Image (tube, grey):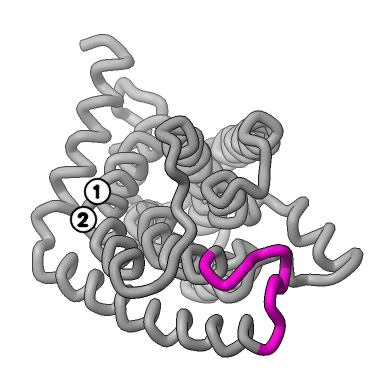
């Protein structure tokens, strides 16, 4: 089997694996919808007081909320991607089996995470977003090209998100328990991606720093493309730059870590 076919099969396997968790998917759709309702009414009240806050009108702000709910699990903004399983395999020593596979460790887990992300987008993201579009004023593009540009930004966001989480997962080679690191990832991902508030709302130097961090590639970048607040090509360049940097850093750390695989599970 060629390398391309191998990693495609891994991605398809990741998609099918998450598709079997039907009850969890239904519960996730319900949770995202309820949380979206809480956020959208908060946003509506805030934008009533300060129209065009952050350069968004009320319909755009509402769209941003439901887009965030669609991408929350897709991009594992609060955790929940393959990093949990990878860290557990490192802790127990099962990672040694992965290292013996005739496949690249990083690309294997990237393919698995892309399969997971695609399922979460379709299985858990579309329904809350559609619900929001039906029952609240939203600002959706009318040109198919904008939707295509948005999906490209989402695909790049998937790779950036994996790059961040893969680096976090590799810390398990040195830590006995990755719970604290995962909790820090959840807090940072939720805040720095713009999940709670659009990064446009952060003033001055703070806003500039937040938008320069890789987490802004996850939600803020695709949202700006969808809402017409950013030119797609510079956005792609920013996302691709972070994707390459994070994957390269992950490869370096992986090389160092796998030289001294420590079986922490006994």
Magenta segment: does it hold 9?
no
Q: Which residue is mark 2?
A: 123
In the picture, measured across the screen, residue 170 lies left or right of residue 245, that is left
Structural distance between the alpha carbons of marks 1 and 2 = 6 Å
**Camera-nearest residue between 122 and 243:** 122
- Residue 170 rendering spot, x and y as whole percentages: 52, 50
**In this view, 248 is above or below 63:** above
Residue at the image point whose x is 74% and y is 55% from the top: 211
Residue at the image point whose x is 29% and y is 48% from the top: 116
Mark 1 element type? helix
In the picture, measured across the screen, residue 6 lies left or right of residue 36, that is left
**In this view, 138 is above or below 234:** below
Q: Which residue is mark 1?
A: 119
Q: Quadrant of the C terminus?
A: bottom left
Residue at the top extreme, as displayed:
2
Residue at the right extreme, as displayed:
205
Q: Residues within 10 Å of mark 2 (few under 14, many from 20)?
A: some
Disc 1 + disc 2, Cβ < 8 Å: yes
Magenta-colored span: 49-59
Residue at the image point whose x is 40% and y is 67% from the top: 69
């Amino acid at each position: 089997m060629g390398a391309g076919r191998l990693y495609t099969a891994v991605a398809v396997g990741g998609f099918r694996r998450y598709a079997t968790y039907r009850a969890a998917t239904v519960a996730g759709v319900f949770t995202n919808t309820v949380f979206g309702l809480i956020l959208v009414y908060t946003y509506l009240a805030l934008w009533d007081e300060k129209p065009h806050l952050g350069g968004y009108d009320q319909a755009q702000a509402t769209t941003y909320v439901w887009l965030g709910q669609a991408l929350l699990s897709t991009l594992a903004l609060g955790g929940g991607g393959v990093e949990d399983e990878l860290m557990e395999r490192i802790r127990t020593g099962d990672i040694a089996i992965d290292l013996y596979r005739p496949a690249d460790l990083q690309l294997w887990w990237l393919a698995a995470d892309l399969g997971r992300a695609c399922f979460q987008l379709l299985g858990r993201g579309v329904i809350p977003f559609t619900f929001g579009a039906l029952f609240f004023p939203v600002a959706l593009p009318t040109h198919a090209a904008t939707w295509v540009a948005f999906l490209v930004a989402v695909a790049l966001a998937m790779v950036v998100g994996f790059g961040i989480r893969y680096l976090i997962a590799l810390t398990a080679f040195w830590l006995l328990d990755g719970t604290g690191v995962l909790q820090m990832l959840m807090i940072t991902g939720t805040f720095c991606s713009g999940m709670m508030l659009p990064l446009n709302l952060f003033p001055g130097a703070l806003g500039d720093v937040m938008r320069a961090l890789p987490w802004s590639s996850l939600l803020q970048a695709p949202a700006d493309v969808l809402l017409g607040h950013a030119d797609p090509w510079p956005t792609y360049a920013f996302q691709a730059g972070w994707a390459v940097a994070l994957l390269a850093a992950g490869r370096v750390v992986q090389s160092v870590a796998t030289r001294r695989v420590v079986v922490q599970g006994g």
